[in-house]
Amino acid sequence: SVGFAASKIVSVTVEVSEATSEATITITGPAEVWFGVGLGASSMCLHPQADECPSGGPYAIIVSGSSVTEHKLDQHAPGVQLARSVHVKSIAVQGGERTVVVTRPLKGLTQRHFTFNPKADKLDFISAHGVSLVFAKHNLHDSSTLNFVSVDQPTCICRAGIQGKINGAGFPYPGPCAGQPTGDLAFEHNPTCSVQTYSGGLRCCIHGNYLLDTDQEPPEEYQEYHMKFRFYFEEYVPGPKPSHQNLLRLYWTTEAFAGEYDIVPCLPGTPTQDCIQVITSRWKIRDLLRDCTLRSDSSCTGVGSTDASKTAGVKLIYAGPHCHAPSCLSMELYNADTGRLICHMEPAVGQSNNTYDEKGFVALPPCLWGSLKEGLLEPELLSLDTELLSIKRNNNTVGHYGEMASWQMRGTLVPRAGDAGQAEQAAALAPSKR
């Protein structure tokens, strides 16, 4: 199949061959500056989760003069250069434009390299160019989509909805919201689920952009705010039994992949105590895990972590609900298989000048597990197939955009007893020396 697309930055053609298991990529851009394309993404965050980007940016091919390199981008950062998998067939300059033709295997060389799906009918990509031949911060950027057609075969063409962009970034198509029981937003037709109904939120607040009317100038004033942090630590004792274990990062959003959602105002005249908007999400423990080596990416949970023959499950040590006070009323996490409440959180509003009760500050108390001698409940082993249920409640007397309902969690991976990979996993979980 062959796909072609032109953005305001570059033009791209991709030919995918199942017969040779190879892709031929042709990229044309300005000759005097670097340019590049990031594959399989509509922004510099590959898998955005609320306001975080744990998986970083997409795989990219960067052209700088006669140099062609491959990179794993980071969010708004150049990321790291990858091992070479492309073969440069030609580079030509004509009329102020540079055209590069490269080939590479369909399957990515590593987990960080992009893998082509020969059955796909489209491919999202981002593009950018700089101000010189030195690969650095981009000057212009854009997002677009390659649409593939079969060669020497009939191709079905079907229009299945409206696509669009916000701030130059492609809006997820057909939409970012998951269906039930994973999430409620699509079922409820929350405005954040469609580019046709999106009214405001994170996608309008990309760094450096101002959301103003055409006759308004960007304000010169700066908003100043203060944040307070407390750091607690214990000294690490190495052995023979290490005093600490690394905690895996486990993350889920009740808004289920949308990353945000609208608080829709209740009907006028409804008593405030009755204005409550509720959303839920259901998922399994294995959905929190990503089977790749811990040292390669912060979102990885270890090789074999999703394999029930190697991994017994997870023990939660920390569950930190994230929502936007003061309209956030509560967040709850349940073991849906047993109905048992795992964590309940209500925002705590400071009432005095005392430590931990400072007036004007709002805390979202996390749930913690540990040892009984420390006054904590022992963590429960949750198998890979344990289903979790999140329930989020907001007061919706007044509507607003960009609300979140995420669970920022940490836990330990529990290997199967006697598994040959147990020592390897334990070593991977041990704190690294710095």
Image (cartoon, helix red, strand yellow):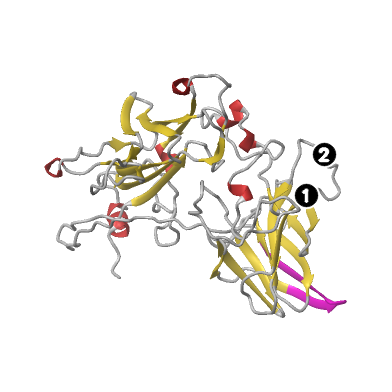
Residue 108 sits above or below residue 78 on the image: above
Residue shown at 34% from the left, 36% from the top: 383
Q: Given this view, does label 1 or label 2 mark the residue nearer the observer?
A: 1
Callout 1: helix, strand or loop?
Answer: strand
Q: Residue 427: percent from the left, percent from the top?
A: 28, 59
Residues rendered magenta in the picture: 89-105
Residue toward you, 87 or 32: 32
Residue at x-position 35% and y-position 51%: 248
* Whole-percent x, y for residue 403 in the image: 51, 39
**Picture layout, residue 432 above or below residue 4:** below
Quarter of image, res 308: top left
Three-letter amino acid code of the residue under disc 2: Cys
Question: Is most of the magenta stretch helix, strand or loop?
Answer: strand
Crowd class of label 1 (few under 14; some 14 to 19; many from 20; radius 10 Å): some
Residue 231 colored magenta? no
Tag 2 residue: 156
Q: Would residue 277 be found to the left or right of residue 20 on screen?
A: left
